Amino acid sequence: MQNRQQLIQAAADAIHKYGIRGTTSARIQELSGLSRGMVNLHFGSKEKLLLAVAEELSARYAGQWKSIADSPELGPADKLISILKADFDPLVLNARDVAIWFSFRAEALSNPDIFPFIDSRDKSFRAVILELLQQIISEGGYKDVDAKLATDALIALLEGLWTDFHLHSDIFKPQEALKICLFVLQSMFPRHFDFKSIS
Amino acid sequence: MQNRQQLIQAAADAIHKYGIRGTTSARIQELSGLSRGMVNLHFGSKEKLLLAVAEELSARYAGQWKSIADSPELGPADKLISILKADFDPLVLNARDVAIWFSFRAEALSNPDIFPFIDSRDKSFRAVILELLQQIISEGGYKDVDAKLATDALIALLEGLWTDFHLHSDIFKPQEALKICLFVLQSMFPRHFDFKSIS
DNA sequence: TCACAAAATGAACGAACATTCATTCAATGT
DNA sequence: ACATTGAATGAATGTTCGTTCATTTTGTGA
């Protein structure tokens, strides 16, 4: 099980370093320091190892925001900010993982096995955001705001910022990304958010 | 030159159908109906053919919004809406092209040659949006709105909606995406946009 | 109609690929 | 100390990859 994890790490590194096209058995072997046969011994095939990488990535991301969404003593606005901060945390938003994320995203259409892992956002994540925004709308009496529309907007905004990070991880500032989100939220819910007050 | 274009089409179809990893010389040959040697005869290598695909895609996208940005007799708000509509036009936002777009995006980090083509948005496009928003801010006296922040937000939103389309092109509604954009713009610039008035 | 050049073909090639499996090694129980 | 078993190894294998190039076909000017 030690070597199994080592192979997942090596495969992830290979995708980051060489792209998914350049991720060959030889490269994985080199980066892992293990022998040729290990991939097939532990995973059956290279393809299944790649699925295991997707699975781990997906699990890490889900664990990140779910731990926050479950915290009980937090108002909807503060909870939402916490989730946003978690979304820009280096634990999930780092050059390597995002590069892998995008590689799998590109593959998803022609490789249905991968799809469930890279689409994880769109299921439960959406539901949590929607509920928080509904609470905020109710609290603040924002009667002109459609919660579903605002949810779509916020999630698309997050996706777009991730894309920006993927292409420009060298100059991307998580602080700045958070500011952009809060600016949008303030525009929608002026009585709940003040984007100048970020820590 | 006839066959040259045919090869670009076939390569693009291959990326869409089989993913970039599954895009082999044999597949391109099959889809093009041409002979084995044609790729190397016309492009020198498969890799250069892929670059030509990226170039064409990039040129088509740039041509799309630039023709609108150059139209003289349009207020900044209307011009912005036109650009948004163009961004969701089937000419650029269709399953095949977006799939290719995302494949190249994923490759960009490990293949610097591709980067200039897939990053085209972030140069002149950003400048145009920024200028339009500055005009709107000036016109409407939105003194609390930072134009650069709003530009970042809007572009990230567009990127995110493209991502949504990529993963769910079957259920994605361009009309709905436009509505989301207008909703966000209305939140920022209430005296310039009314998202209930879309055609 | 013929000569010539350019374009197109596809069999053949070496390189790189993922995978296999006989063998070796290390860990554990007796 | 020895036997047993599962993990690890890496040389060997067959396949698929992108590319080459001698040959054929097509198009053009005389």
Image (cartoon, coloured by chain):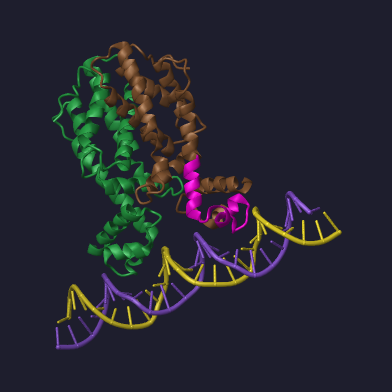
Chain colours: A brown, B green, C purple, D yellow
Asked if residue B113 can be seen in this view, the reply is yes
Q: Give left or right: position of B194 versus B154.
A: left
Q: Give left or right: position of B74 versus B169.
A: left
Q: Give left or right: position of B56 versus A36.
A: left
Asked if residue B145 can be seen in this view, the reply is no
Q: Position of residue A185 (x, y in %)?
A: 34, 20
Is residue B114 one of those drawn in magenta? no
Residue displayed at 30% across by 14% down: A138
The stretch of residues the image draws in magenta is A29-56
B133 shown above or below C9: above
Residue displayed at 47% across by 34% down: A61
For residue C6, what is the image quadrant?
bottom left
Give the mark count. 0
Observer-nearest residue: B193 or B170?
B170
Is residue A31 one of those drawn in magenta? yes
Q: Position of residue B92 (x, y in %)?
A: 24, 44
Q: Position of residue A83 (x, y in %)?
A: 44, 24
Observer-nearest residue: B93 or A132?
A132
Q: Position of residue D20 (x, y in %)?
A: 42, 72
Observer-nearest residue: B116 or A9?
A9
For residue B145, what is the image quadrant?
top left
A84 shown above or below A78: below
Residue displayed at 45% across by 29% down: A87
Q: Main secondary structure of the magenta part?
A: helix
B78 shown above or below A16: above
